[in-house]
């Protein structure tokens, strides 16, 4: 374009965001308004967005039609160059972006996707597929406040600075494609069963299996604890050398008891210490998912979906997919506005109290720019909050975030701890007491239990309780009124719940077979298995492919999952694989390693995997066959437990027939208040509770409408739509749609 033409046409900058919500935030700051579907436009800027990824790597059949059929002899599939394609479901938005990129009045592109590896991939693939030839700059911000956006646009970077990050992202995607596609097809073809694997989901399943093995091997051991009552104070025996409160020798416990009954207790030492407990850090997504599961039984996926609504629809919480528990310094100036916004309902008094202390003028330990990469911790926005518009689940998650936000702005919890150490029959006994001086941050929880108290309740169930202690001094002699020996048994580690599984995925080091310190460090630095954004999907994938199931709140590996772990190559089960990959990807991002060398290594690894699978001599056996036959092909159906349902599925994956028997609903039994199962179809659907209570769906609707509290007509309809949607979703892995009706030879 000539300079004269440029002068005639008002040239503009196209801004590409990752999601509509972020695009609208940027558009507001840049004074852009809706001008068409999928973009905003103003005097100087046009703002558009992806819907996450608009472009992905081609499926195998995109390289050759022969790959439509899954055949062992065609594996491994190794295209000379992996290519991208537009995702069909979001093609309309891609075409919008492409037209904007090619507009004559667009002089440059600003990449404004998430500041991180995947964000870079989202933008670069879109621009590549749109055949962009125009110069690009990069907006790199850790938060999307108006101030951060304005500052970011004032300091735009040359996009070439992020080329190594993009190459690392492409390498990650291509490596996952090569291993995932080939290993899944090989296992499926070899054993004629829907078996999927990957570098994240397989080690995750292996961790659950390892925990089950640990529980199975556990042998309970009896232990004994000794207490002595003197002058109304309960003293607890403590082993002199180890400090343990337990002995595993019954005879010794009885001997100590016998001797102690003959003597008085002498106070050897009194200690009074001022203790401070500082508030926990702000929430990242994983920590929030853990707490929501512990407190409310919400799954990781449910919490993420609720967060998305609170972020995108209600606009009352910040970006959910964050792995940071810190804020950037630019956010501090907005704290008062955020306190104003959430000063409603039960939070009003506390929020106004905190605001009166001018939090924006203080130095906070949770403010650290270096500890924020893509996004800062989850906190309330400056948007006014209307609690009445939220669902019950949204209120619960919002409550967690707001109380944590208020807590970090309050002072430490302070108390005086008194410890008496006494001597009795040559043994050491202690008594502890606590006097609270200031509730501090615990006031934000209004007598609700905090996370730390839960942990203490779990881990220190047998520990001596705090008590109010009288005034005593060193040398005081106390007659012993009673000596008691209590017994207990050691317990095995608990089965994983979604909360504890998230923790294990975040820190899988204890499940590593090797003691490679470097690999362990890398796993810690890279956030473990998966990312905050993908862990919920990984867990759901494992449920939906029936590799694991829920029994109550506990997660168990299914028979299918156990067999998969026996059939899959051992390397793919180890967290070390992810650590090794992440070390190399980090090297690519820093410019220290060529992506070509990494992909060649992955290709060699993939070929080795396929050879190992092909050489396998084991067989796959369905251990959940029923006597009921498939109405379509006549083969026996499999009884499977989905995440929230029980169903019958045809054993022949080519058939694909499935039948839902029941689903766990959110409807509560009016007698025992537990969640009821929903059985049947159409108008014959019936709620059945474990306590024996039964109620037709039609009667349930009428009853709830009459009650007028809890569940509205809209809520019931919404619930039923959700059930129908879930019923229509694929039950197996992400590749299910590709091979559901394929002919495997």
Image (spheres, helix red, strand yellow):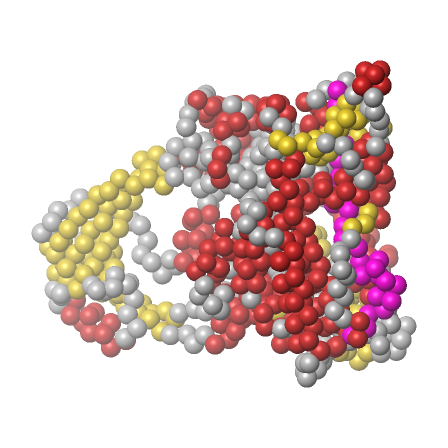
Query: In the picture, residue 251 is in which quadrant?
Result: bottom left
Q: Is residue 620 visible?
A: yes
6 lies left or right of 616:
right
Residue 47 forms part of the magenta stretch: yes
Question: At x 82% / y 70%, what residue is drawn?
Answer: 70
Give x and y (percent) for residue 240.
Answer: 20, 63
Q: Quadrant of the C terminus?
A: bottom right
Residue 451 forms part of the magenta stretch: no
Q: Residue furthest bottom?
A: 617
603 lies left or right of 504:
right
Give x and y (percent) for residue 729.
Answer: 79, 57
Q: Tell me if residue 306 comes above or below residue 668 in the rendering.
A: above
Q: Quadrant of the N terminus?
A: top right
Front residue of 548 and 58:
58
Give x and y (percent) for residue 712.
Answer: 75, 41
Q: Residue furthest left?
A: 475
Q: Is residue 309 visible?
A: no
Q: Tell me if residue 696 comes above or below residue 271 in the rendering.
A: below
Q: Residue furthest right?
A: 632
Give x and y (percent) for residue 242.
Answer: 25, 64
Front residue of 47 and 596:
596
Q: Which residues are magenta?
A: 44-72
Query: In the picture, residue 40 is in which quadrant?
Result: top right
Q: Tell me if residue 599 comes above or below residue 117 in the rendering.
A: below
Question: At x 19% / y 46%, what residue is drawn?
Answer: 271
């Amino acid at each position: 374009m000539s300079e004269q033409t440029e002068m005639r046409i008002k040239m503009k900058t196209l801004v590409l965001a990752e999601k509509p919500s972020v695009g609208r935030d940027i558009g507001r700051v840049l004074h852009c308004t809706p001008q068409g579907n999928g973009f905003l436009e103003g005097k100087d800027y046009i703002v558009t967005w992806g819907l996450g990824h608009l472009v992905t790597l081609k499926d195998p059949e995109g390289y050759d039609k022969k790959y439509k059929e899954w055949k062992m002899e065609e594996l491994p599939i190794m295209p000379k160059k992996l290519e991208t394609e537009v995702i069909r479901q979001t093609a309309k938005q891609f075409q919008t972006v492409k037209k904007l990129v090619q507009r004559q009045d667009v002089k440059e592109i600003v990449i404004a996707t998430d500041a991180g590896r995947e964000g870079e991939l989202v933008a670069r693939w879109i621009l590549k597929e749109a055949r962009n030839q125009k110069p690009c700059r990069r907006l790199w911000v850790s938060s999307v406040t108006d101030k951060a956006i304005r500052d970011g646009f004032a300091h735009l970077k040359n996009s070439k600075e992020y080329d190594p990050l993009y190459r690392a992202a492409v390498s990650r995607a291509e490596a996952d494609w090569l291993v995932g596609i080939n290993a899944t097809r090989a296992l499926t073809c070899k054993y004629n069963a829907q078996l999927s694997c990957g570098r994240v989901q397989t080690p995750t399943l292996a961790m659950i299996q390892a925990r089950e093995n640990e529980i199975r091997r556990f042998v309970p051991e009896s232990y004994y604890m000794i207490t002595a009552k003197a002058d109304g104070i309960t003293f607890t025996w403590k082993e002199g050398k180890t400090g343990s409160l337990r002995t595993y020798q019954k005879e010794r416990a009885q001997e100590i008891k016998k001797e102690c009954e003959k003597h008085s207790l002498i106070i050897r030492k009194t200690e009074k210490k001022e203790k401070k407990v500082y508030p926990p850090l702000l929430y990242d997504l994983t920590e929030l998912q853990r707490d929501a599961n512990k407190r409310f039984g919400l799954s990781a996926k449910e919490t993420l979906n609720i967060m998305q609504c609170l972020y995108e629809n209600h606009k009352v919480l910040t970006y959910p997919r964050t792995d940071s528990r810190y804020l950037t310094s630019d956010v501090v100036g907005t704290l008062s506005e955020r306190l104003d916004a959430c000063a409603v309902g039960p939070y009003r008094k506390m929020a106004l109290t905190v605001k009166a202390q001018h939090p924006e003028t203080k130095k906070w330990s949770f403010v650290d720019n270096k500890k924020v990469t893509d996004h800062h911790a989850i906190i309330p926005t400056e948007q006014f909050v209307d609690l009445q518009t939220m669902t019950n689940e949204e209120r619960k998650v919002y409550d967690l975030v707001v109380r944590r936000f208020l807590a970090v702005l309050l002072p430490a919890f302070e108390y005086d701890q008194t410890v008496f150490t006494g001597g009795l029959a040559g043994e050491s006994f202690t008594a502890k007491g606590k006097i609270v001086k200031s509730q501090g941050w615990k006031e934000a929880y209004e007598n609700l239990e905090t996370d730390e108290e839960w942990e203490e309740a779990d881990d220190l169930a047998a520990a001596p309780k705090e008590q109010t202690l009288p005034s005593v001094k060193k040398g005081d002699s106390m007659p012993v009124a009673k000596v008691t020996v209590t017994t207990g048994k050691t317990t095995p580690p608990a089965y994983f719940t979604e909360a504890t599984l998230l923790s294990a995925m975040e820190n899988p080091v204890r499940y590593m077979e090797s003691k490679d310190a470097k690999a362990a460090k890398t796993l810690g630095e890279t956030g473990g298995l998966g990312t905050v954004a993908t862990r919920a999907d990984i867990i759901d994938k494992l449920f939906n492919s029936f590799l694991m199931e829920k029994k109550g709140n506990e997660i168990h590996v299914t028979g299918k999952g156990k067999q998969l772990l026996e059939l899959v190559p051992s390397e793919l089960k180890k967290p070390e694989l992810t650590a090794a990959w992440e070390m190399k990807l980090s090297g690519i991002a820093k410019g220290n390693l060529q992506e070509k060398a990494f992909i060649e290594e992955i290709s060699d690894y993939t070929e080795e995997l396929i050879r190992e699978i092909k050489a396998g001599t084991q067989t796959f056996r369905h251990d959940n066959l029923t006597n009921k036959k498939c109405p379509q092909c006549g083969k026996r159906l499999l009884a499977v437990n989905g995440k929230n349902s029980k169903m019958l599925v045809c054993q022949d994956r080519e058939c694909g027939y499935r039948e839902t028997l029941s689903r766990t609903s959110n409807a509560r039994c009016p007698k025992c208040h537990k969640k009821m199962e929903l059985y049947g179809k159409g108008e014959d659907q019936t709620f059945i509770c474990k306590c024996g209570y039964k109620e037709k769906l039609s009667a349930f609707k009428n009853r709830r409408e009459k009650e007028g509290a809890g569940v509205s007509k809209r809520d019931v309809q919404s619930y039923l739509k959700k059930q129908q949607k879930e019923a229509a979703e694929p039950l197996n892995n992400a590749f299910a749609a590709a091979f559901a009706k394929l002919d495997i030879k």
